[in-house]
Amino acid sequence: MPRALVAMSGGVDSSVAAALLVEAGWEVVGVHFKQVEEGTHPASCCSLEAAELAGEVAARLSIPFYVWDLKESFARQVIASTISGYLQGLTPNPCLLCNRSVRFGLALERAKALGFDALATGHYARVVRTERGPRLARGADRRHDQSYMLAALAPRVLEDLVFPLGGMAKEEVRGEARRRGLPNWGRRDSQDLCFLPLLRRALERMPPRALREEGGRVLGSLGVPVTVGQRRGLGLPEGHYVLEVRAGEVVVGREEGLFRKELLLDEVFLWEPLERLEGSRACTRYRSQEVPVSWVGWEGPFLDVVLGEPARAAAPGQYLVFYMGELVAGGGRIVLAR
Amino acid sequence: MGCPRAAGARAGPGPDTGTLMTVGRVYLDHAATSPLRPEAAEAMAPYLAGSFGNAASLHSFGREARKALEEAREEVARAVGADPGEIYFTSSGTEADNWAIKGVLFAARERRALVVSAVEHKAVLEPARWMASRGFELRILPVDRDGRVRREALERLLDPGVALVSVMLVNNEVGTVQPVREVAEAAREVGALVHTDAVQALGNLEVDLGSLGVDLASFSAHKIGGPKGVGALWVRRGVRLELLLHGGGQERGMRSGTSNVAGAVGFAAAVKAAMADFPERVSRLEALRSRLVQGVTSRLEGVRVNGDPDGHHPGILSLSVEGVDAESLLLALDARGVACSTGSACTSGAPEPSHVLQAMGLGAVARSTLRFSLGWNTTAEDVDLATQALVEAVERLRGR
């Protein structure tokens, strides 16, 4: 019997993932990862309630269940760079970082050391075998597809992963949970960042930056983190969006100013040869529209990407992910959008 | 992908199959809970099935229950050198601890401060913190590297504003025995009351409340082979104590709620059994504990024993294994059928690095520390199987 370690958040997706593996004959062990101090966010995946729920589901499935304290590594590898990113005017992507370095980094390492054949999660994504090795593909449920957040995982890591929900639709998953009487079938999905309150506190005393209209006058100042494309909560004039965030100022203007055709990337990961990426499509945010890629090439240490159509609100700090059909072909962190 | 099943994984059906078999499994987590002693099961049986009376009722059914309850109280009192009139049954050790802390502080007139050691069980620490949030002053008594409180450190925290000092008799994570008699002497000099959480001490150390010098002590049945859901608080006569539970006035008006007669009877039977085999069992546990230490340290490098080598619980062993994280090791041992724990077994959702080890200045090794706790039915074979499993698991985890 193959053995799988299933990461159980307490949510409906990972619970059904565990149930499906048990029914498919795997020897399953559930683990809940504690990434943030409990109590910082009651609705998040790291609350005591979530851990208890995960434990309840595991008991229902008659599988062993453990809680692993990954707070320290999460703080060092994800929280620190997220806070410093915001202070530098970036829009960081902590979920992608966490997947790469904590969940499918440290936790996978532990799972392998313990002799597990696979680490399974409830992500909506698929691992597809190709002639060139395993590749990550979009989940069948396009609306809930999470391949963007997993894009930075190297193909050799994919060999050890199982995503039982990759071929399923979210509604089906809820139905499966309900059919099995899992206690969390109706629980709402966690939407916010799991360490949002902590992040807010850390950024409370962010040095104020000038709020300037594109090509013109200063409207005031801002002491809170903002992201490119943001419109609400800043008291901006009607029809205005954040167009650019720089160290000393935030530039706002009309929506037309949000579209950029050329992006420079660092932290580049390529799962396909560069020449194949021309003609691929790109996403510049989680669940954003795909846009065609017309040219890709190195510009010094950075990867220069020219898009066939302008992308909306491509924010430095977020990742661009290349897709070839359903397959994730690579990506990198946006450093400049022009 | 191959399927390298761990050697000896999950031998024997678990409780979920309804057969409660322990064949092929080794239980070294008695400090979390101990299996029910047959003596307790036997004593309880009539009160689970036939004799159902409410001990407060005036008819013959009630009298039957009341008689059993009072005999149980006498048995428990006898074991700890107390007067039965000073023993109050509770639902748990946690309730007894909560009652002692809250009851004494709420009853205190002028005194507003509370001193508790840094290594107390959460059942003491959490009510203490809660009282601090209600306007009382909490003073935390530090411990040394062996986990022992020092009289000098305590004296620095004592003044006439202190209402209560709470120091456990023996620590549940590292097994260190506390100098409670000295604590009590020091506390008495400033007129403070003294509570001791004796949950892990009962049945494993001599507990003589007549000479210990404390005013309140908490006990629990299920750590020594009694049933879960019953504990006791001993309160020296004359101590002013507010109530935690108000209602029908059971337990001489001190603790309302219909008496758990079967629980009390099982508690008493377990205590009686523990007293009957006390010297023999304690020396056997000491020998088994040494055997485990010997076996592990002779085969593995980088293993240290935490706690006070000169005064420890006979069955509790805290081991730090260099270079291995305890969470992985626990899982690997569980897969090999060996049950132990990474700290106290209270909340599955709170795998904090142990506050006890941190207070001992061992925060750095807290993440690689496991607790093995031996009890009344532990055998040499159990210890040898656990040693073998531990050595294999550590070698495998270190091998990468």
Image (cartoon, rainbow, N blue to C red):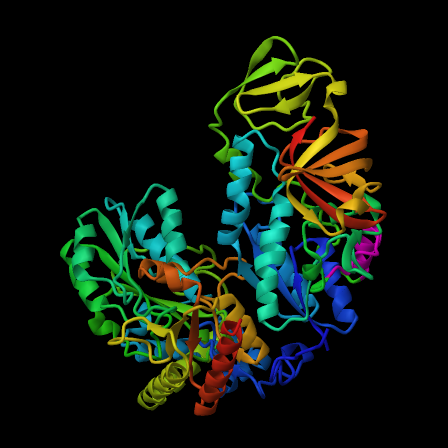
Residue B260 position in % (x across, y down): 49, 71
Q: In the figure, A6 relative to A115: above or below?
A: above
Depicted A54 relative to depicted A87: above or below: below
The number of numbered badges drawn on the structure is 0
Q: Residue furthest left?
A: B189
Figure check: A171 above or below A20? above
Q: Name the image quarter holding residue B255.
A: bottom left
Q: Nearer the viewer, residue B127 or B318?
A: B318
Is A330 contained in the magenta span? no
Residue B191 screen position, x and y as percent:
17, 54
In which image quadrant can residue A85 be found? Answer: top right
Res A229 seen here: yes
Where are the magenta residues, as a range? A162-179
The reply, left or right, for residue B111 in relation to residue B243 is left
Q: Is residue A173 magenta?
A: yes
Q: Residue furthest front?
A: A300
Residue at 65% x, 46% y is: A96
Q: Nearer the viewer, residue B390 or B373?
A: B390
Whole-percent x and y of residue B205? 30, 78
Is B211 on the left-hand or right-hand side of B381? left
Confirm whether residue B377 shows in the render.
no
| Along the viewing direction, whichever of B242 and B54 lies nearer the viewer | B242
The residue closer to the viewer here, A68 or B265, is: A68
Q: Give coordinates of residue A69: x percent, y percent.
A: 52, 58
Which quadrant of the figure contains the N terminus of chain B? bottom right
